[in-house]
Image (cartoon, grey):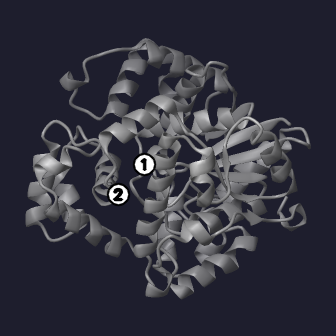
């Protein structure tokens, strides 16, 4: 079975995401499986997703996906390079043949050319004063000035990292770019599409008519119910968890976590020990050299407590399983094919029988991330732990999907 992969977060799923899936479906043969690899409880910006992963996966299947797999949290909570590498390798191991992504401009050939050039560049990062992404963009602009305009687009960094990850595979996937309509970074509610971050901010006020226009109709009632019941992340509550760990952990303990290098452990400990809030502390630590998203991921590390060795081994070995969250009939056929060559997880109880020790560690980290997200929910009624153990993958008949 031919399968096209999409790496996503769907935080939350909106009409721009539905458009991407519909375009992939329109450009593909009718029997092609559209497979989504999605961040679970935490997202790449370094915080819990607004809603749980099962609802977000169902929203994607209703709008054109055939199966949604969880991107293990060790990759979801990584830099753009780690996020892309984890997603691309999981897509390959599941048996996907193409990776599709949305871009403002440029072709797959353009990004593969950029990726090949980027992989050949080398420099001493300790001599740089900007973020790693900015440094790479500057170097590529000098090497390929004719493609420099692509590098300033909001989605270019991920598309570039996808290309680099594809080129690093033993048997590269094909790459397909889908032109975006409207900007992902757009915060306006006047155009045909807007950004997930703008929608998250607006949803704090409820599902108003303004934001409802950017939510697929089949998903609106779910979102309204989740907001009404308090089954969503309260980011002030989560920030307090990070602030607590910032005060408890010593600089020596922080050094054992990923990304705490170059004296950042001392700046971190001082800021969280003296300032009142999560936002104040991160603002005090922020410099031109460290992207805000990196600092947010470091905050997640203080709460989830992964070791640097665990991250290093995961980056080296790649995802060890495919955790299915939601699927339809075509997705079920894809699952049957995929599990012939790769471990497919439907429930954590399978772990000791089918996963490697590293795979078990990755799954344990996923479950811990889910527990912290649940503890961050607005309503105490939804803060129970170990939901991964009693929530089964969701099956949605294709007749119920939007097309």
Indicate the position of residue 143 as horizontal and vertical percent values. 43, 13
Looking at the image, do the residues carrying marks 1 and 2 touch, with CB atoms under 8 Å apart? yes
Q: Nearer the viewer, residue 190 or 220?
A: 220
Residue at screen point 52% across, 34% down: 318
Q: Is residue 276 above or below residue 350?
A: below
| Residue sitting nearer the eye, 364 or 356 | 356
Instruction: Give the residue number, with chain letter if any, for mark 2.
Output: 304
- The residue closer to the viewer here, 188 or 178, is 178
Identified at 27% across, 41% down, the residue is 259
Q: Which residue is mark 1?
A: 77
- Dot 2 lies on which element? helix
Residue depicted at x 20% and y 57%: 283
Q: CA distance from mark 1 to mark 2?
A: 11 Å
Of label 1 and label 2, which has the lower sequence position?
1
Is residue 235 in view from this perspective?
yes
Residue 227 percent across, percent down from the top left: 54, 81
Whether residue 38 can be seen here: no
**Looking at the rendering, in which quadrant would you find the C terminus?**
bottom right
Q: Position of residue 109 (x, y in %)?
A: 65, 20
């Amino acid at each position: 079975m031919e399968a096209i992969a999409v790496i996503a977060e769907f935080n939350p799923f909106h009409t721009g995401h539905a458009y991407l899936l519909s375009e992939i479906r329109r450009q593909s043969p009718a029997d092609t499986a559209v497979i989504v690899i999605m961040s679970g409880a935490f997202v790449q910006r370094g915080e819990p997703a607004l809603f749980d992963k099962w609802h977000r996966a169902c929203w994607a299947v209703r709008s054109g996906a055939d199966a949604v797999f969880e991107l293990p949290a060790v990759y979801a909570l990584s830099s753009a390079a780690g996020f892309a590498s984890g997603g691309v390798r999981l897509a390959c191991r599941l048996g996907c043949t193409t990776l599709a992504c949305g871009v403002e401009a440029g072709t797959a050939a353009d990004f593969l050319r950029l990726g090949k050039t980027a992989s050949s560049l080398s420099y001493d990062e300790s001599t740089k004063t900007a973020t790693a992404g900015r440094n790479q963009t500057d170097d590529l602009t000098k090497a390929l000035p004719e493609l420099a305009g692509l590098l300033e687009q909001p989605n270019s960094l991920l598309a570039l990292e996808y290309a680099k990850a594809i080129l690093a595979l033993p048997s590269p996937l094909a790459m397909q770019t889908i032109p975006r309509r409207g900007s992902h970074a757009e915060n306006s509610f006047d155009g045909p599409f807007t950004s997930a971050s703008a929608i998250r901010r607006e949803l704090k006020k409820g599902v108003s008519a303004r934001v409802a226009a950017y939510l697929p109709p089949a998903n609106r009632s779910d979102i309204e119910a989740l907001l009404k019941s308090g089954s969503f992340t309260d980011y002030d509550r989560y920030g307090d968890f990070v602030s607590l760990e910032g005060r408890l952990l010593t600089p020596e303990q922080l050094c054992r976590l990923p990304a705490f290098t170059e004296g950042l452990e001392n700046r971190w400990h001082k800021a969280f020990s003296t300032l009142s809030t999560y936002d104040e502390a991160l603002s005090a630590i922020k410099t031109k050299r460290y992207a805000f998203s990196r600092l947010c991921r470091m905050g997640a590390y203080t709460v989830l407590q992964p070791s640097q060795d665990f991250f290093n081994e995961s980056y080296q070995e790649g995802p060890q399983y495919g955790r299915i969250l939601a699927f339809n009939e075509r997705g079920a056929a894809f699952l049957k094919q995929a599990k012939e060559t790769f471990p497919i997880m439907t429930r954590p109880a399978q772990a000791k029988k089918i996963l490697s020790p590293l795979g078990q560690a990755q799954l344990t980290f996923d479950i811990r991330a889910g527990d912290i997200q649940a503890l961050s929910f607005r309503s105490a009624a939804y803060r129970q732990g170990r939901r991964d153990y009693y929530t089964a993958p969701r099956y949605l008949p294709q007749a119920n999907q939007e097309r």
